[in-house]
Image (cartoon, rainbow, N blue to C red):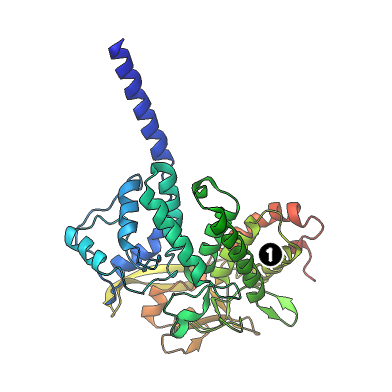
Amino acid sequence: MKKLLIIIFAFSSLKAQSNFNQNYPDVSGFQNSAHHWYDIYSEENVINPRPGRPRYKPENVKEIADNILLYQKENGGWPKNYDMLAILTEDQKDSLLKAKNQLNTTFDNWTTHTQVEYLAQAYHLIHDERYKEACLRGIDFILSAQYSNGGWPQFYPDTSGYRKYITFNDGVMVGIMKVLYNIVQNKPQYSFVDSVRREKVKRAFEKGLDCILKTQIKEDGKLTAWPQQADNIGLFPQWARTFEPPSICNGESAEVVLFLMSIENPSKEVIKAVQSAVQWFEESKIKGIRIIEKKIEPKKYYYSTFDYDRIVVNDSTAPPVWTRYYELKTHRPLFCNRNRKIVYSLAEVEHERRAGYTWYTYAPQQVLNKYPEWQKKYAPNENVLNNKSR
């Protein structure tokens, strides 16, 4: 009997562990910052990667969550460009603890909202009170950083320069809104959020949605898509880095539209925003070209080294593609160098930016693929892909 109980207990433990492994939180949101930590040198980092160090596996939830606690600042936010899965040395951990009062907290490069979501899921699995408290502090940080017009800056509280602009780049607006929507929708991982915070989150979500609708670019009375960053007061497209000009930005806009499509029972304003963006994607797609990478001798630059180049070739079999930027008013595909010089072909971009930046995107195709199902549900009498005139 005792032996049987041991076998049953062992089987139950294995089954529980199997279920745990199958439900561990998604870590893909940390990849952008991790890439910057390993591949792009920054003098601002408190710690830098050590050669040959191992990383935690996605199933190491407790260890990853403990890392996230180390990186969290006193104000509740997180800095960007570190690897949440890195197995840190004791001196690296000590350095992070000593830097807790730094104010370099940001939403850029998929930061802060990804940590908040991960901690919520980690607490749901492990029930470590530290994860709950850190998650709540992260939510409070998000709420405190929101502008009265509903947008979020790229950095907070440091809103100097272009850091103050409302940012769609690198998942800032949409990433935050997804977290808030999960709370509004009463997703299980956020069951611990108290009623007072829930009400604040609901108001913040509604303001954020209104900001998204108001920043959609309208030209000659016709809505198109979104900028990469919008002025924090006037809501018009703005410059960010010197190679990121005001424009219609298809890569980030695709993410915005997919989020709007995920909203249950959308308002007529949300439906119009989606319909307009879908038609813009259809009208702005480029056929007959393919972007390829070719190997070259490594070229070292200040930030990174590239052993490839990117070129555009004609290919009638290639799927539709979109440029990241389209010029305001003219809608010409747009590119830019670090010296703010705007050019109109990838070949005119200097090699460092040509290889080191994403100038073309296939992301709008995800929207076009999803549109028929969404349209039948929320706009059954108006298929904009079959109605070229509005």
Q: Quadrant of the C terminus?
A: bottom right
Q: Quadrant of residue 83?
A: bottom left
In the drawing, does residue 376 fall left or right of residue 157? Answer: right
From this view, report whether residue 309 is shown above or below residue 192.
below
Q: Estimate the x, y position of residue 105 in percent, counting from the top left.
A: 39, 71
Front-most of residues 178 and 226: 178
Q: Estimate the x, y position of residue 264 in percent, counting from the top left.
A: 67, 53
Front-most of residues 232 and 18: 232
Q: Quadrant of the N terminus?
A: top left
Q: Estimate the x, y position of residue 320 in percent, counting from the top left.
A: 59, 65
Q: Estimate the x, y position of residue 365 in percent, counting from the top left.
A: 59, 61
Dot 1 falls on a residue whose secondary structure is helix
From this view, report whether residue 330 is shown above or below residue 368.
below
The outermost residue toward the left is: 91
Can you see residue 290?
A: no
- The residue at which mark 1 appears reads as 274
From this view, report whether residue 18 is shown above or below residue 266.
above
Say which residue appears at 33% left-offset and 47% top-offset.
Answer: 62
Can you see residue 69?
A: yes
Say which residue appears at 47% left-offset and 68% top-offset.
Answer: 170
